[in-house]
Amino acid sequence: METTAHIDFIAASYAAAAVVIGVLVACVSLDYRAQRRTLADLELQGFTRGSGMPRAERTADAKEAAKEQA
């Protein structure tokens, strides 16, 4: 049995899997950035989260994060 007879199929399968994983990583990264931007906007509007830093520090951090994203 020759292994080279199916090398095209094997290579295509690995390439397809790599593309799918790459697309998933890109989607998660873009969604993460969008969620961080949304949280920063909400914090600038005065909405706070239940835990974390005091309000003044959160607002300063949110402003800084918004500047970095722009």
Image (cartoon, helix red, strand yellow):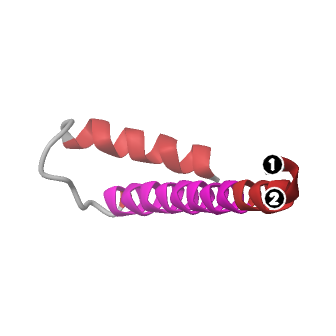
Which amino acid type is marked by label 2?
A: His
Q: Secondary structure at mark 1?
A: helix
Q: Nearer the viewer, residue 2 or 62?
A: 2
Q: Predominant secondary structure in magenta?
A: helix
- Asked whether disc 1 touches disc 2, contact meaning CB atoms under 8 Å apart, the reply is yes
Expressed as whole percent of the image width and height from the top left, the position of residue 12 reads 79, 61
Find the magenta span and give its range. 16-43
Q: Which mark is residue 41?
A: none
Left of 55 or right of it: where is 7? right
Quadrant in the picture for residue 17: bottom right
> Magenta stretch containing residue 24, yes or no?
yes
Query: In the visual, does 62 lie left or right of 13?
Result: left
Image coords of residue 3 (percent x, y): 80, 48
Q: Could you say which is closer to the camera, residue 38 or residue 63?
A: 38
Given the image, on which type of amino acid does mark 1 rest?
Answer: Thr
Which residue does the image show at 87% across and 50% down from the upper left?
Answer: 4
- The residue sitting at 51% across, 58% down in the picture is 28
- Mark 2 crowdedness (10 Å alpha carbons): few <14, some 14-19, many ≥20: few
Please name the residue shown 18% across and 37% down the image. Answer: 54
Q: Which residue is mark 2?
A: 6
Residue occupied by mark 1: 3
